[in-house]
Amino acid sequence: MFSLIKLPPVFNVHQVPKAFQEDSIISGYRHPRSSATDCLLSLFQLTNETLNVWTHFLPTWYFLYKLLTVVCMQDVWTDAYTWPLLVYLLSCCVYPLASSCAHTFSTMSTRSRHICYFFDYGALSLYSLGSAIAYSAYVVPDAWVNSAFHVYYVPVAVINSVVSTTMACYSRLGFPPHSNPDRFAESKRPRLGKVLRILAFSYPYLFDNIPLFYRIFLCVGEGCTANEVNGLHVYHAFLAFLTGFLFATHLPERLAPGRFDLIGHSHQLFHVCGISGTHFQMQALEMDMGLRRSWLHDHAPAITFRGTVGAITLSSVISLGIICFFSYPLFYSTAQGEATRKASSASKKN
Ligand SMILES: [Zn+2]
C-alpha cells in the first residue's frame, strides 16, 4: 500500500534556504515549499522533523485524557478548588499540540514557518501561566500563603506570559516586524534570536518556580510544606533544567554534526525531557492538591474564576493579538508580492 503513496524527497543542508537550516543538522530536510499534504505525508517518513512532531503529538492525547478524567471524575462546575488544575491541564494539552502542528507545517514557506512558531511560542507562554496558576493554588509553601508575593504572583505571571510571547516573536522578526523574508532579524543575527528566545522562556519559568524552589531547596523550619511530594517536584525541576540545557547547547549534534540528523538530536531530546518534566509536574501538583486541600481551604485565599479561567483567557487573547501583530506584515508582503507578480506577468503579455 505504501508503494502507492509517493513520499516527498528529502534534502541536505546546502539545498535549503538559510532560514530553514538547523545548527549541526546536515541531512533529512523537507522541501522549503512543501504542500500541506507533503507536510502530513512526511510524518510517515524519517526526516529531521518526524520525531519532533510525534514526541509532542502523542503526549497531547495523554494530557487530554488526564484533562477529561478530571472533568468526568471531579465536580469541576461547582468545586472552585479544581479550576487551577483544569487551567493547568488545558495549557498542557495546548503546548504540545501547537508545537506538533508548528513542526508539521513549518516547511510550507518562510512565512508559514514564522507564523507556525509564533503560535508555538504563544502556547509555551500559556503553559508557563497555567503552571503559575496551579502553583499559586497548590504548591506555594505554607509560610508564603497570603504573603504579598502570593497576592501578586498570578498577576505578574500574566504580565510575564505577554512579555514572553512578545519577546519570542520579536526574536524572529524584530520590531517593528519586518515584512521582507530576506531581511528578517533572525536570519541576519541567528545567535541573538536564539538568546532572546532562551531568555523569553527561562525568565517566566524561573519566576513561576520561585515558590517551589524556595520550598524544596531553601526553606528550613516551620511552614516549609516538606511533604512526600517534594521528591516529584525535584524530578520536575531537574528535567526542566535538562530541557533548557539541551535547547541552549544543541548537544549532542554539535559534537558530531550529521550523526544525529534523524534520531537523537537535541530538539527531540528537548521535547522528550520537556514532556517528562510536565508529567512529573502534573503528578506532583495532583498530590499536593489532594494532601493540602483541608489546610489550604482554611488558610489560603478563595480560588476565583477571575484568578484562574479569567487570567488564562486574558493572556490567551493578548497573546493572539501579539501573534496577529507580528504575522500581519507577513500576509501583507505575500499579498503585495502576488500583486507585483501578476502585474509583471500582465505587462510581459502586453
Ligand atoms: Zn519543538
Image (cartoon, rainbow, N blue to C red):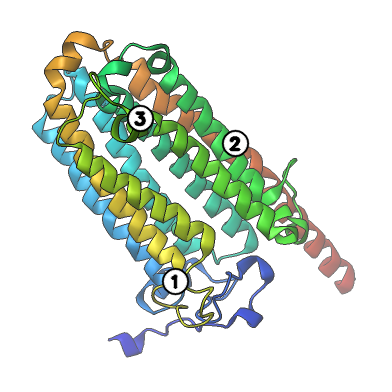
Amino acid carrying mark 1 in the image: His
Residue holding disc 2: 322
Task: State which tag comes first along the sequence, 2 or 3.
Answer: 3
* x and y percentages locating residue 240 in the rendered image: 38, 49
Task: State which tag comes first along the sequence, 2 or 1.
Answer: 1
Amino acid carrying mark 2 in the image: Ile
Residue holding disc 1: 265
- The residue depicted at 39 percent of the width and 34 percent of the height is 209
Q: Secondary structure at mark 1?
A: loop
1 or 3: mark nearer the eye: 3
- The residue depicted at 31 percent of the width and 31 percent of the height is 87
Q: Secondary structure at mark 3?
A: helix
Q: Secondary structure at mark 2?
A: helix
Residue holding disc 3: 214
Task: Work out how far the residue at label 2 is from the one at label 3, CA to CA, in angstroms.
Answer: 33 Å
Residue extending furthest left? Answer: 73
For the residue carrying disc 1, how many other residues have a C-alpha within 10 Å: few (<14), some (14-19), or many (20+)?
many
